[in-house]
Amino acid sequence: MFFQKKPHINTDEQKIEQFLTRGVEAVFPNKAFIQSKMKKGESLTLYLGIDPTGPTLHIGHLVPIRKLSEFQKLGHQIIFLVGDFTATIGDPDKTSVRKPLTRDEVLSNLKEYKKQASRFIDFTGANKALFRFNSEWLSKMNFKDVLDLAALMTVDQMLKRDMFKKRIAEEKPIHIHEFMYPLMQGYDSVALDVDGEVGGNDQTFNMLAGRDLLKQIKNKEKFVIAMKLLTDPTGKKMGKSEGNMVALNQTPEDMFGKVMSWSDGMIVPAFEIVTDVSIDTLQDIKHKLVGGENPKNLKIKLASEIVTLCFGEKESEQARHAFEQTFSKGEVPEDIEEVSGGKAWIDVAIEQSLVESKGEFRRLIEGGAVSEMTTGEKITDPNTVAVTGVYKIGKRRFIKII
RNA sequence: GCGUCGGUACUCAAGUGGUCAACGAGGGGAGACUGUAAAUCUCCUGACCUUGGUCUUCGAAGGUUCGAAUCCUUCCCGGCGCACCA
């Protein structure tokens, strides 16, 4: 327990309402429960757990992170929990066991996390966010502790989880340790002794497991806020496993471009859950879309908003400019690699890692993907000598031969 | 333990002695059309030289054969059923 001068708790009704609704998919046990706590001005703790499974955070993480930040701004205590222990175990996946990560992988993934998270969360000052690791407690438990914990849940409860049902239906294996995952993650709630947890809707089962455990072990009612997932119109999740993710370590230009390539159906949900635009603006955007405004314009606004959030207004403006210049007007991007020519194209391509194999480059040539920007002339033979000019390979790869 | 079915490229999934670098679908890349959208049409999607070929791949290792992803043996991993269950 630590005693510090608690900052003022904001009990503004509108802000609380916003906190509990914007981008929120579901709350447990119910909205009124959390509302009353918040209105009373109680100082609450809320945490978000993230497994360091990739080298960077991505835009999907942003949704709960920003919700966490919102809570911090209201004066409450927030905790950013890194699932360093759980990541070395492997979360059950839809189809199979996720490959467990090694300690080293986890540590290297971790490096960037705090840095990236600190763009949104305040890790300094009077009400600083805590940065914790679940190995602090999970690595210390012995088999007896684990059994005691496991005794609190039944197999039937576990089997309610969709992915397990699915795997049984598909006659795919389920390992015992996969049942432990919700327990471990749930135990985080107990160890941290929090008032609430926020996370993506895909984490609802695990979050509720924690709620259950906390109730049984400490007789405490944890609230759970499940955030909407950033999905494309087909309901597919945006995430690293789906390949359409926007990583937070990308350049502003790349991020801008990625957002622009989202499908139109993403515009409204993305505005709602990953930007700060007001509810009025949101309505306005919906109307414009229905009214036949070119969705591209709204998407540019969306991309600008998102890049601003991550990098600031200036960077965002530059990214937008670069995007319009490069793609809308078909001009050459400003910062491109310059290499000296004088040798066969295929060698240049390999040396510059523009392609992964010579075969791939040949295929691109055959497909007419390599051309000079100003004359539009296509390279038709991979063995021709690269001469001075600015070339593009496909849509996004550029190179300048000097 | 016994029986039985299965393990194929990024994913799903055909193929069950030569015509298999391996059907098809998804994903990814490229071209056309565009708003770097979606939809649609076309092409490509193991590596290396290249009209053709060489090499590496179908859970692992051996074997049979002129020739295997395909047959045999052993092993590893999984599903299901039966048996066992202090």
Image (cartoon, coloured by chain):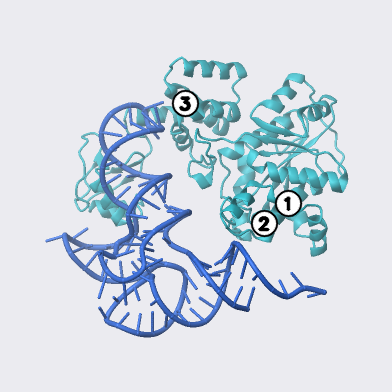
Name the amino acid type tagged 2.
Glu
The quarter of the displayed image where residue A66 is located = top right
Task: Label 3, secondary structure: give it.
Answer: helix
Closest to the observer: A115 or A33?
A33
Crowding at dot 2, Cα within 10 Å, few <14 / some 14-19 / many 20+, comes out as some
A370 in relation to A140, above or below? above
Q: Residue A269, labelled with which disc?
A: none
Task: Give the quarter of the figure containing the N terminus of chain A.
Answer: top right
Q: On the rendered image, what quadrant is the C terminus of chain A found in?
A: top left
Q: Position of residue A350 (x, y in %)?
A: 32, 54
Checking the image for residue A178, the label placed there is 2
For label 1, the crowd category at 10 Å Cα-Cα, with few meaning under 14, some 14 to 19 and many 20 or more, is few
From the image, state the color of chain B: blue
- The residue that mark 1 highlights is A156
Question: What type is the residue that disc 1 sits on?
Answer: Asp
Q: Which chain is cyan?
A: A
- Residue on which disc 3 sits: A299
Q: Position of residue B34 (x, y in %)?
A: 33, 26
